[in-house]
Amino acid sequence: MVTIVDVARAAGVSPSTVSYVLSGKRTISKETRRRVERSIHKLGYQPNAGARALASNRTNVLALVVPLRTDLNVPVVMQFVAATVAKARSFGHDVLLLTKDEGPDGLRRVAGSSLADAMIVLDVESSEPRVPVLRELGRPVVLIGVPTDPGGLTCVDLDFTEAGAASVTHLAELGHRAVALLGPSPAVYERGTSYADRFLAGFKQAASSNKVRATTMACAPTYDALRTCLDTLLARRQRITGLVAHNEAVLGPLLSELDRRGLSVPGDISVLAVCPPDMAEAQVFPLTSLAIPVVELGELAVEMAMRQLDGPARPEVRLLSPQITDRGSTGPVAS
Amino acid sequence: MVTIVDVARAAGVSPSTVSYVLSGKRTISKETRRRVERSIHKLGYQPNAGARALASNRTNVLALVVPLRTDLNVPVVMQFVAATVAKARSFGHDVLLLTKDEGPDGLRRVAGSSLADAMIVLDVESSEPRVPVLRELGRPVVLIGVPTDPGGLTCVDLDFTEAGAASVTHLAELGHRAVALLGPSPAVYERGTSYADRFLAGFKQAASSNKVRATTMACAPTYDALRTCLDTLLARRQRITGLVAHNEAVLGPLLSELDRRGLSVPGDISVLAVCPPDMAEAQVFPLTSLAIPVVELGELAVEMAMRQLDGPARPEVRLLSPQITDRGSTGPVAS
DNA sequence: TTGAAAGCGATACCAC
DNA sequence: GTGGTATCGCTTTCAA
C-alpha cells in the first residue's frame, strides 16, 4: 500500500506538505505542488479512509436511512436513493445505506461508531421514535418528511397539505363538485406517516372551502383492494367526476379498471395523480399530475446536510410548493 | 467520546484486554469479562470505526454496486438491495451503496482507499469493463451475473440458459407449438447484459429441440412498445398460444392489453412470467412464473463475499436452477 | 512556504 | 489469563 509517507519521500517533501496539497488548507508553492501531484500520480496514491477519519473526525460518508419494505413505494424510494447518491458524490461523500428496520439503535450505532458524518432519514412518521435519538446524536441530520415535533431538526418535504389542497382546487376549478381521494395503503395511515395525513387534511380542507363533496379512501396496493375501492366510490349517489390518486402503486390498475368499466378519462372521470413526473408519463396514457419532486428532495437533503457539516446552520423546515402539470387526464366536467 | 482507554480504566484492566473481550480472540476470565462488559455498558462505549479499520485492516463494510438507471427494473434491484443489507448486517457489516455510473474508477477508488472489505456487483455485462479492474483489486468480489470471462472471479446468478429452456419446455409439455418470448428492453440486449442473452439462447435452443416454433422480441418498458410487440406477435400466421414474459416492467400492461384484445389467460393464451415471486402474485391475477430468486441471490452473494473474507476461497460460478411455480396462467392448448 | 511530531483510537504482537 | 506498547496512515498544531 502506498502511503502519504511514500509520496512525500518521492516528492522530496514532508508528509504534512502532501497532506496540505491534498486538502488545500495551506498555500503551497507552484513548484512543490507540481512535484507532489506528480508523485501522487506516479505512485497511484490513494488516501486511506480509515486513517483519514481517525485523524480528522470526518468520514466523508453520508448515512441514508430508507424504508425497504415492499409496502412503501419502491420505485419512488429508489429514485430518491439514486438522486442522493449522485449528489453526495458531488460533495466527495459516499453513501452508507441503512434500513428503517434498524430503528433508533441503528442510528445510535452508526453515529456512535463514527461511520458517517451526517444522516438523511426517509419515511418519517408523525410521532417518530427516531427523532429524540437523532436530536441527541449531535450530528447533522436531515429528515425527509415532517414529524409532529421536529424540534431542532432540519426537515425537507413537499408541502403535502398544500398539495392536498391544490389537487382539490385544480378539480374544483374545472367544475368538479364531487371528488374522491384514493389514498395510500391503510398501513401507511396506521403507521401515522406524516405526509399521508397532511395530504388528507389539505384535501378535506380545500374541499370544504371549495364546496366540493369529497370522499376519501385508503387503498392497499393490490388489484383487489383497488377494485373494492372503486366499487364503493362509483356506487355513490352523487357521481364522482374527479379522482385524485395519491398512491403510485395502483395507478396502472386504476386506469385499467376504469377502462374495463367503460369510463373514459377525462371524459367520464378526471384523474389527477400524485407521483413523480416520470411515473405520470409512463402510464397507459400520460396523467396530469401533482409532482412529488423526488430528485429535488434528494438533492436538497444532501445540500442541507452538507451545509450543516460546514458549520452549524440553524434548523429549518423546508416545504416545497406543489406543482401540477396538465397532461390531459383532467378536464372540465361534462354538463 | 468514550474510548477503549476509558473503558479499560473503569474496569481496572488494560486496553488490550478490553479489545480482546470485544473480539473474542483471546480467552478471558469470567470475572474480567464481566467487569469489562459492565464498564462498556455503563460508559456507553462504542468502538470507533475509523480507528478499528486503521488498526485491523477491516472496515466491516461491504460495497454494493447497483445500476440506478430507470431502464433496468427498479423494484427488482431494490429487493436485492434489501436482502443484501439485511444479510450483511447479520455478519456485522454495513453496506456502502455505489452506482454503476461510477464505473471502474469508482471501484478503484473504494478499494484503494479501503472504504470496504469486499464488493458485490450487480448488472454484469457479458464483456464487462469492470471485470479486469475487479480482478486486480485483490479484494473479495462477488458478481451477480456472469461475464463472458469470469476468470478468477466469483459469480452467482440464476441459470438463465436453463431458465430459458425450462420456460419453453413448460409450455411445450402443455402442448404449445408456437410460443413467443417477450424479452427485456432492446437497450438491455445492446448493452450485452449477460442474463438476457443467456435466457434467449436457452429459449431458442429448447424451442428447436422441442420442435416448437419460437418468436422472440425485445420490448422497451412502455405501453407503446408493448402494444407494438403484441401487434406483431399476434399477427403471425401460426397463432401463438404461449407467451413468456421476461420483462417485469410490462407484466401489468401486457395483461391489460391481452384483456382489451379479448384474449383470455390461459384459455386463449398461456402466460409465463419470469420475475420475482411476489411480483407474479401481485398482478391482476396470479401468474405462473419462473422465479428470479432475488432474495436468495442477495443473501448468497453476501455469504460468498464473507467466506472470501475468512480466507481465500477458490472462485466459483454458482448457477441456481430455475423453478417454475404454477399459478394458473398457463394451461394446455385448446384443441 | 515548509517541516517535525503529537495525536486520533483501535489492534495485536511480545512479554510475563 | 493479562498487560505494555508499537503500529496503522493521516491531520494539524507548533515552530521555523
Image: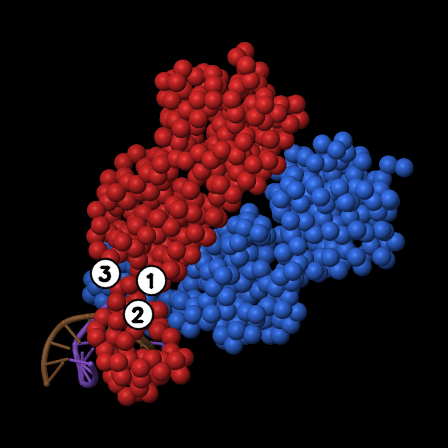
Chain colours: A red, B blue, C purple, D brown
Q: Chain of mark 2?
A: A
| Image x and y of residue B297, in percent | 59, 56
Q: Are marks 1 and 2 on the same chain?
A: yes
**Quick check: D12 left or right of A231?**
left
Q: Chain of mark 1?
A: A
**Which residue is label 2 attached to?**
A52
The front one of B16 and B272 is B272
Judged from the image, the secondary structure of the residue bearing numbered disc 3 is loop
Q: Amino acid at mark 2?
A: Arg
Tags 1 and 2 touching, CB below 8 Å = yes
Image vertical order of residue A86 relative to residue B17, above or below = above
Q: Residues within 10 Å of mark 1 (few under 14, many from 20)?
A: many
Q: Are marks 1 and 3 on the same chain?
A: no
Q: Is residue A247 visible?
A: no
| Image x and y of residue A247, in percent | 50, 34
Measure how far apart labels 1 and 3 are at the Cα level. Answer: 22 Å
Q: Are marks 2 and 3 on the same chain?
A: no
Q: Chain of mark 3?
A: B
